[in-house]
Structures are given as structure tokens and as C-alpha cells.
Image (cartoon, rainbow, N blue to C red):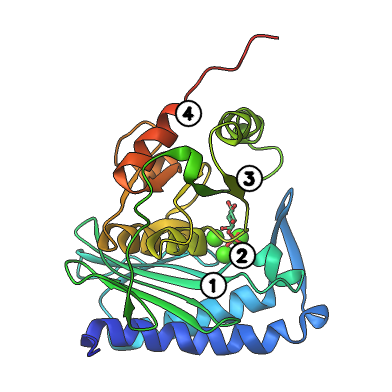
Amino acid sequence: MARSALLNVMVQAALKAGKSLARDFGEVQNLQVSVKGPSDFVSQADIKAERLVRDELLKSRPTYGFLGEESEEIKGTDGAHRWIVDPLDGTTNFLHGIPQFAVSIALERNGEIVAGVIFNPATDELYTAEKGGGAFLNDRRIRVAARKVLSDCVVGCGIPHLGRAAHGKFLVELRHVMGEVAGVRRMGAAALDLAYVAAGRLDGFWEAELNPWDIAAGLLLIREAGGFVSDMHDGQDMFHTGTVVAGNEYIRKALIEVIARPIPKA
Ligand code: IPD
Ligand code: CA
Ligand code: CA
Ligand code: CA
């Protein structure tokens, strides 16, 4: 499959950061780790990977802005374009030697995500999408799963960090969802969770308290794989609400309804 010049730049950046992450993953016990908040860590590996991605992207598109998890936002001079990057999504997995983590790179143009790349260097799985061009896993076209009823579905979720407002609410949501589906998974890297929905591995996904860098690339992958994504209120304000519900349209809608159910009276 021939990739566009833009996607090539993004893939090169993801592979470069991925190589650095793979090296650090092999020596994870030697990495310096600091704590941002309860159950929220950042390591040298995150910071190194972000620098590699940022340098690579800004070298090829110097006028674009850059929003990354681990550094100050850079406002672009062209006003229309912004890279949105999570250099290491799944830091907790990474630090525990669990090979479920990824580099996530998206390009926003006039407020719309137009290209996305997610790369897991531990499995060599590279997900790519460009607006209107479909979604791919290692150059093979992917599509969301077709299951229409929740009781057949395996859905992914994320658990908000300890101490955050959504943490307690999640327990209620989980209880409701568990009663409806064939299985629930918590795999620990939101970018990959969304990529798995795009690839039809997970039928659906929901999580709250996410940041734009966790989801930007994944949102496009899902749409380009024929799926649907919204916030938990059925709107499109995922970046500000920090909430995401995804799947094919049957499953996304069904999940929204189940998640919104009130807390049962004791
Ligand atoms: C985290 C992961 C995790 C999700 C958290 C994110 P990080 O990202 O995506 O799955 O549940 O909300 O913060 O910190 O590992 O890049
Ligand atoms: Ca983090
Ligand atoms: Ca993340
Ligand atoms: Ca991260």
C-alpha cells in the first residue's frame, strides 16, 4: 500500500520512538520514574520518546503546533495544524513489563483529526488512518466488528486514576455493563483500546477522564474503520469532556444507554 507523504512522516516518527521504547522496555528496572499523581507515572522512556517524535514531526512540518503529554504545548505559526501526541500510552503496563503500550500520533487540521498513527513496538503492530482513506493494521484494511447485541460483545474500558471524580462512578458503570455483555477487558492503553475497536477485536469501549493525546489518533482509526465515537452524552466533545464511547453504531448507542443508568437504590 502506498502511503501519503504526510502519513510517512508520522509513521517514521512513530517507528523511531517505538525503537527507543523497545530498548527501554528491555531495561525497565533501570529507568528513572516520577509520580505525577495517584497511580499516574512518567519515566525517562516517556520523555525520550516524546522528544524523538516532536523533533521528527517539527523537522518535517516546522510551522505546525505540537501538543504532547510530556511537554509544554508549542503553538504553531500556521494556525491550522496541530500534532497531538502521546509518546507512550500505557506507561503503567510498560513499567510492569506488560507489552501493551503504544506511541500515538494524530494530526489536527482546523480542529478536525485528519491523520492518525498508533504503533505498539512490542508486537510490531502499526495502525494508520487518513481521513477518507480507510484504516489499516500493518497495511491490511481493518473494520469494526459487526455484532449488534451487547450480550455477544466483548468491550474494553479504562479505570480512571485513583482520586479522580470519575473513579467511583466507574464502578457503577462497570456493574451495569457487566450485566449485559459477554466480557469486559481493561487492557491499560487507551490508544490501543481504540485501535482494537477499529480492528474489530473489541466490539466497544468506554472510558472517562481521558486527554486529547490518549484518543486523537484512535478516534480517526475507528471512524475510518466504519465505526462511531462519541462522548458519554452522545455528543462530539470528547476532547473537553474527556469521555469516549465507541463501537459500531448499535453497540455505541447501547453502551451509552447502559452507562447512563442510575445508581441502583440499596
Ligand atoms: C493512560 C492509559 C490508560 C488510561 C489512562 C491514561 P498513559 O495513559 O491510556 O489506559 O486508562 O486514563 O492516562 O498515562 O499511560 O499515557
Ligand atoms: Ca501519563
Ligand atoms: Ca495516554
Ligand atoms: Ca503517555
Mark sitting earlier along the chain (3/4): 3
Above or below: residue 201 compared with residue 25: above
> What amino acid does circle 3 point to?
Ile
Q: Is mark 3 within 8 Å of ligand 1?
A: yes
Q: Is residue 42 visible?
A: no
- Dot 1: element: strand
Residue position for label 3: 159
* Quarter holding residue 98: bottom right
Whether residues under marks 1 and 2 lie with C-beta atoms below 8 angstroms apart, the answer is yes
For disc 1, the neighbor class at 10 Å (few under 14, some 14 to 19, many from 20) is many
Q: Which mark is residue 102?
A: 1
- Residue drawn where x is 34% and y is 59% of the image: 222
Q: Residue at x 60, y 36 (%)?
A: 178
Q: Is mark 2 within 8 Å of ligand 1?
A: yes
- Secondary structure beneath label 2: loop
Label 1 vs label 4: CA separation?
29 Å
Badge 1 or badge 4: first in the primary sequence: 1
Find out whether the residues at labels 2 and 4 contact each other: C-beta distance under 8 Å: no
Relative placement, left or right, of 79 versus 197 is left
